[in-house]
Amino acid sequence: MSQAAATSAVSTDPSRRARLAEFWYYFAENRGAVIGLVFFLFLVLLAVFAPWIAPHDPVAQYRDAVLVPPVWQEAGRADYLLGTDAVGRDMLSRLIYGTRFSLFVGVIVTTLSLVGGIALGVIAGYFRGWVDTVIMRVMDIILAFPSLLLALVLVAVLGPGLVNAMIAIALVFQPHFVRLTRAAVMSEKTRDYVVAAKVAGAGHGRLMFKTILPNCMAPLIVQATLSFSSAILDAAALGFLGMGAQPPTPEWGTMLAEAREFISSHWWVVTLPGIAILVTVLAINLMGDGLRDALDPKLKRS
């Protein structure tokens, strides 16, 4: 048995390595995707090591350093490389810690949307009939509302806060995963390997989640990546409107909301959080484009 297992491992490993090599080849062809991946990994490192990288406590107020400009401007100070805000908090430290909140929001929202969307989409696409009709009409109702407006209403009902904002955004994003999963399952369930598994006696649960679902994951991974960036953007928008993370949390949208009155007099207080949101969302979207190129067979060039 051990010799057979070893032979099996030897025979499967090369194919797995070949698939990974093929994936990286097509992903790396998109230079923007590679740049996005590098920047995203940089953000992850910032988030993980924020307590050691940030020069100051992100919520500490230094009353002798209110609205200090960045170090390269006149009156800038080396202690505050990117300046301070209206109550003397270090901008660099708040931006670094804000990375934690943004990535946390992206991970939680995407996970909730993906898990719920896959479960409902697989059920709708596999069973069809009235189950499919009920699930899809509910999803159509959710999609009938502008996503940010619906998230705002849900947060208003649940109450302001980062946790409620994540729940609201996840509910708003779920129809995209449901529709994508349903379409993929409907396409796959009539294939020969599914019919063979059904004839062999596989139950509904095994057919749905063990046989069909693994072959539907490529488009879902791409959608999850794009939803990750949208979640960060929507969370920042809710924070800006006062319905997301609450002060003094160093979340980028909340930082923008606190700095609105200084937009014409102290540019760095508003511009720096905006740039952080822009480059983060751009990097993740570029990475999503690369994943689409690598995972979609129709886009692969021979």
Image: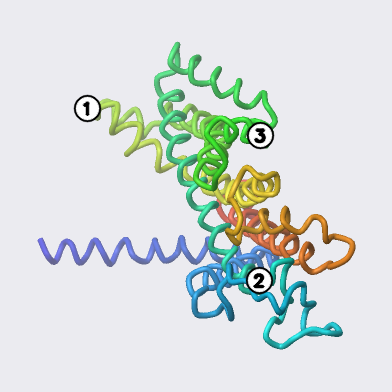
In x, y percent, where is residue 75? 83, 84
Q: Please tell me how crowded label 3 is: few (under 14), some (14-19), or many (20+) other residues with Cα within 10 Å.
A: some
Say whether marks 2 and 1 touch (CB < 8 Å): no
Q: From mark 3 to mark 2, how far is it between C-alphas?
A: 33 Å
Q: Mark 3 points at which residue?
A: 147
In x, y percent, where is residue 151? 61, 35
Kindly identify the residue that appears in the image at 71 percent across and 79 percent down. Answer: 64
Q: Mark 2 points at which residue?
A: 89
Q: From mark 3 to mark 1, how far is it between C-alphas?
A: 42 Å
In x, y percent, where is residue 206? 28, 33
Q: How many labels does the image show?
A: 3
Kindly identify the residue that appears in the image at 76 percent across and 59 percent down. Answer: 259
Above or below — where is 212 with respect to 109?
A: above
Task: Name the residue type under label 1.
Answer: Gly
Q: Under tag 2, what secondary structure? A: loop
Q: Which of 252 and 261 is in front in this view?
A: 261
Which quarter of the image is occupied by the N terminus? bottom left
In x, y percent, where is residue 277? 69, 59
Task: Name the residue type under label 2.
Answer: Arg
Residue 296 visible in image: no
Kindly identify the residue that appears in the image at 84 percent across and 68 percent down. Answer: 266
Q: Under tag 3, what secondary structure? A: helix
Q: Mark 1 points at which residue?
A: 201
Q: Quadrant of residue 80?
A: bottom right
Apparent side of residue 265 relative to residue 290 in the rendered image (left or right): right
Q: Which of 61 and 107 is in front in this view?
A: 61
Q: Quadrant of residue 157?
A: top right
